[in-house]
Amino acid sequence: MGAVETPESGNGINNSKDWVTCRKCGLEYPKSWSRCSVCRTGSSVTKRHGGLIAGVAVAAFFIIGTYGYSQMKDNLAAIPDTWSKTTESYSKPTVAVPQTGLFEADVEDDCIAQFNVTSYDESAPCFIELIDISNEDNVVTLFVNPGETARIMVPLGSYKMICASGEIWYGPRYLFGPDTTYTKASKIYEFEKEASGKIEGWSIDMTPQEEGNLHMDEVSKGQW
């Protein structure tokens, strides 16, 4: 997400973006988004994703009938005890917790690769972004509540995965406030079409396991 701190930034996903305030619910969200992610007011589509959010389920239905799939899987390794936590008070208003699944997308290419993320019952909610390594663009964001699985479709490409987690949700600009934990996957995720024609996707289990092969490295807010 490449967050940039500014004097009034708080905890944000990317404060280099232009932010607007929803006239209906007061949520702050990036100007590039088509609409507020909470009450869905605003313009119906953007020039880039052309109604993607409304059409993901329909597109996925037809895509599954067109392509074969090869699903790779990662399991989260044990979480270090050294990850930081704070208990600072925070004055920003809380926002209703989103449902598990796609939060926002900004893509030009067809979403034909499957991406699944499963959380575990005792985890904190997670706000996840896939960042295109070729241009550092945020392609999709998803939200995963404890004990649930987000299943979305993404464009082919190479992505780094970053995650913000915490207990109290303040919206996409301030995330989980001062208690936000910022992490980044130690690997690059490749979504590609194999020579056989199968589409390679990924499933990630965020349940910590001693022999897990996915390592999430804690990073500072400024590095996120």
Image (cartoon, grey):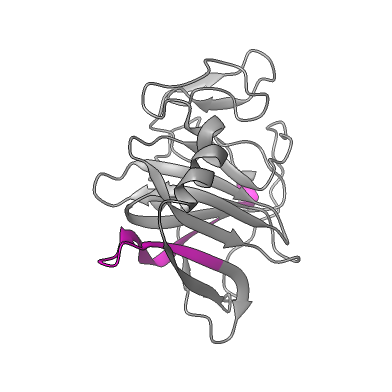
Residue at 61 percent across and 48 percent down: it is: 143
From the viewer's perspective, is residue 74 above or below residue 126? below
In the image as oriented, which residue stretches furthest toward the bottom?
211
Q: Is residue 46 left or right of residue 170?
A: left
Q: Is residue 194 magenta?
A: yes
In the image as oriented, which residue stretches furthest toward the front?
65
Q: Is residue 128 left or right of residue 110?
A: right
From the viewer's perspective, is residue 176 above or below residue 190? above
Residue 185 x/y as whole percent: 43, 64
Q: Is residue 152 left or right of residue 125?
A: left
Residue 200 x/y as whole percent: 38, 63
The one nearer the camera, 156 or 172, is: 156
Residue 67 x/y as whole percent: 40, 55
Where's the N terminus, which quadrant? Answer: top left
Q: Is residue 183 magenta?
A: yes
Q: Does any portion of residue 182 appear in the rendered image?
A: yes
The one nearer the camera, 75 or 92, is: 75
From the viewer's perspective, is residue 167 above or below residue 185? above
From the viewer's perspective, is residue 115 above or below residue 39? below
Q: Does any portion of residue 129 appear in the rendered image?
A: no
Q: Principal SS element in the magenta part?
A: strand
Residue at 75 percent across and 65 percent down: it is: 121
What stretch of residues is rendered in magenta? 178-204
**What count of labels does the image hold?**
0
